[in-house]
Image (tube, helix red, strand yellow):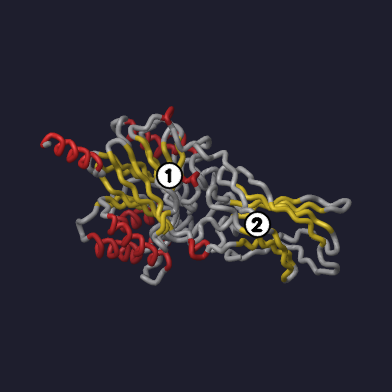
Amino acid sequence: MEALLKEKEAVKVAEKPVLKLGVLGDVQGLPSRHDWGMNNLSLALDILKEKGIDVLLSLGDIAEGGNPDTYALYWKMIEERFGREGIRHFSCEGNHDLGNGHRPDFSAVFRRVCAGLRRPERFICHENIAGYDFVAASETACGVYSQELCAELAGKLASLPPEKPVFLLTHYPPYGTMAGSFDDKAGIRPLREVLDRFPQVISLSGHTHWPLEDERCIWQGNFTAVTASSLAYGCMNEGGFNTVGGILPFAREAVQLLYMELFPDRLEIGRVQVLDRSPAGEKWVVRLPYRPEEAFYTAARPGSGSAPRFPAGARLLTRYDYGYMYLVFDRAEDEVPALYCDVELIPLFPGGTPETHRYVSDFYRLKADRGRRLFLRLPGLGMRADADYRICVYPVSAFGVRGEPLVIVEHTWPGYPFKDGTLLCPQE
């Protein structure tokens, strides 16, 4: 019996995480507790305090323009919850910290930001915490990771044990990995070239503000890459007719963080919606040590080929308002999330040109604010009054798989004064 009790106790010890990590990105704060970003930071820190984290990881864009007063408030909020020495802190800076390209003297701003973040004034920083290595790589100019920096980063990573995970913090993501990184304005190609050589790396980045409900926010190939979303507002730079500069409709509802538990054999990654404390998806689990040939979170992961679907009896309706036609329809079921809707507008008259427009759905919104129906405005690009159109609305998954459409044939109002424009507001 005594031996059995010892064995059970050993299992309990093995199941206790080595480290609990909170990961925050993109506060974009101003020095006021009433500021939206700083208010959300406060809510996030409350969540992480309750979870008992050991380490707080910050992925940059804490303070707009590197404002020292914002960093002072940032640290005050942390110390109010964890005390002066109650938590380890590790960070990189972001483009908003550095003035987003509007500061002529980069070195002076970088010095001020490093002081604000209480980190060494170096482009590559390294700490070992509880036997695990954490590396932060900083921009050498806004949005730029120079060849010299990447060479230094490669040297640092090569000096670390290959069998244990290395947590790499950068504000911008490595190019062509998780969602939002397939864009040269966001994804960094030189980082990708370096990290492809180091399978032990777990890359943590911000900048994209991508909603964590999208399963593409984790990626595995030659290494592992994860985004932490944002505490400010949500974006999807893939666009969508109803986004403005990539900013989502009701973007301020997409306020999220990562909570991670590190075990000797795995890393468990929780996604949290900060405003209502709900999960933003199931946990991701990264097996350790990571082997690229065992990659799970790829484009071919289980479920990636599944199509979303509308519920039985779903209807598609139209509404004419202020010179535009709106579509009103039941939202797709939640079993396979529909991140997008493709709307096909097919003229049924000679000389008409079919159009297809992709819209972002409301998958990232607070559950209490998601209605049973979606309302989408058609662009109005040359639509005719007193004409027939076939309208198809397809639900589309994160991986681009289309489900069966809702279809109607609409005869537009005779004499209706359609506007011909695409002006949108971010909240439309």
Hey, which residue is sitting farthest front in the picture? 1
Report how far apart the C-alphas of labels 1 and 2 lie in the structure.
35 Å
Q: Quadrant of residue 150?
A: top left
Residue 369, how many percent across, how many down? 51, 65
**Residue bearing the label numbered 2:** 314
Which of the image's four quarters has the C terminus? bottom right
Single out the residue that lies furthest toward the left.
2
Of the pair 101 and 411, the residue shown nearer to us:
411
Crowd class of label 1 (few under 14; some 14 to 19; many from 20; radius 10 Å): many
Picture coordinates of residue 364, whole percent (x, y): 51, 57
Amino acid type of disc 2?
Ala
Q: Residue at x 76, y 63 (%)?
A: 420
Which amino acid does the dot numbered 1 rest on?
Val
What is the secondary structure assignment of the residue under circle 1? strand
Q: Position of residue 353 (x, y in %)?
A: 81, 50
Please identify the residue farthest to the top as the structure is shown.
293
Identified at 51% across, 44% down, the residue is 181
For label 1, the residue is 226
Percent of width and height locating residue 373? 61, 62
Q: Which of the numbered marks, if any, corresponds to residue 72?
A: none
The residue sitting at 61% across, 43% down in the picture is 401
Quick check: 321 left or right of 108? right
* Left or right position of 97 against 243: left
